[in-house]
Image (tube, grey):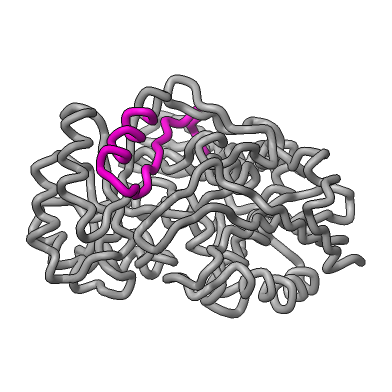
Amino acid sequence: MSWSSQIRIRSDIALHRRAELVLFRVDECTYLVELRFWSVILVTVQIDRIRLVTVPVELSAPLRTSDGMHKSREATLMEITDSHGYVGWGENVAPTGVHYVGESHQDSVQTMRDQFIPLLVSREIAVEEMDPNVWWGTEAFNFAKHALESAVWDLHARKENMSLKNILGGQLDSIVVGVVVGMSDTIDEVVAECVQRRNEGYRRIKIKISPGHDIEVVRQVRAVLGDEYLLQVDANGAYTVEHIEHLNQLDAFNVQFIEQPFAHDDIDSHIALARQGRVRVCMDESISSRKDLEQMLDLGACSVVNIKPSRVGGIGEAVAMHNIVRARGVDAWVGGMLETGIGRASCLAVASLPGFTMTPDLSASRRYFARDITDPFEMHDGEIRVPKGPGIGVVPAPDILASDAIRIETVFER
């Protein structure tokens, strides 16, 4: 058999796609094959202005987890304008306290202002090359990196007149979403909320658990929701190695997995529970980069992964991690961090990628906010539509930007 090939490349920069027409000749027969794939096309952005927009947001109801009660949050939005007048929006969702991430909201915003923004405006930006562990010069402050990088992605997509979903190669137009039910004073209250959320149309519920608030709660919720309803539990690192046999009791209630049962740095306990194989282990806080991801998978510490773009340092890193789990056949899903509509829109774009195999924590706006700062994301038949307009597809409401309650600070102007 003899063969030869001749390649002609057609590039469409607007679509960020390359198509190769490959002419094969095999034993006197000629075949023309068109290969399509997403390519890295370096599109540079020159920034003319950056503003920090701080918006106080009240939750529609308190959310209790193993690390405390959450009643409100301060949303810090990034507005980045380029030399052509295109605008991109991002959101910093760092928690109020330091918690496991070592990055409080106050410190995160200060780092953006003092360190990352001067770096961002002093360099030529190719958004596809913004590796969070290299480009920014530090492995810390992933929430700050994500806020700026996601604004650049939004600006870039708007400039190309494409949705962020399409820029990233997403496939789903509508996504089945799940909801989180926090801890309450009584089991009856947890059960009642689970029933309420199911009746609202959610097809999957994740219950927050902690020692003393776990097995019996799951038992009663399962009894009410039925055997087939998708149920997960999340411990936020509340358990220790001594609880492994106790946690194995969850196997009796057909939970999809337990998320982050142990502290983020207690890898040995995760491995021990995962190896017993009775309850699937999902990792969240323990994985903040693709390096962490591959290490945890190689160690057998988990078989499910929660990928939060904000926690891992940006959309680009989340996509890279998605590619890893897809190649390795590992179940994964996109988690949320109480984002407003700005952060929620970019998360939905990421969640539309084909390798995310489990229901994301990306609930409707009214689940957490009496009023979102963008047009609300609404759920229909258990699904939320991925924005299809340019960029992330949403912007803050004009009356919110004009409100006396918000603070707008211009931190850079050329």
**Residue 330 appears left or right of 161:** left
Q: What number of labels is visible?
A: 0
- Quarter of the image with the N terminus in it: top left
Magenta stretch: includes residue 175: yes
| Residue at far right of view | 414
Q: Residue at x 64, y 49 (%)?
A: 57
Q: Residue at x 74, y 42 (%)?
A: 396
Residue 234 % position (x, y): 30, 52
x, y (%) of residue 385? 54, 28
Residue 228 visible, this angle: no
- Using the image, determine if residue 21 lies above or below residue 292: above
What is the magenta range? 169-197
Quadrant in the rendering for residue 18: top right
Q: Residue at x 39, y 63 (%)?
A: 67
Residue drawn at 44 percent across, 66 percent down: 289
| Residue 12 position within the rendered picture, expressed as x and y whole percent measured from the top left | 68, 40
Eyeballing the image, is 190 above or below 389? below
**Left or right position of 76 against 31:** right
From the viewer's perspective, is 405 left or right of 111?
right
- Residue 214 in magenta stretch: no
390 shown above or below 276: above
The extreme top residue here reads: 381
Pick the quarter of the image with the C terminus: bottom right
In this rendered view, identify the residue nearer to me: 272 or 184: 184
Question: In this orientation, which residue lies closer to the viewer: 78 or 185?
Answer: 185
In the image, 45 versus 12, the foreground residue is: 45
Q: Is residue 315 visible?
A: yes
The answer to which of 162 and 258 lies nearer the viewer is 258
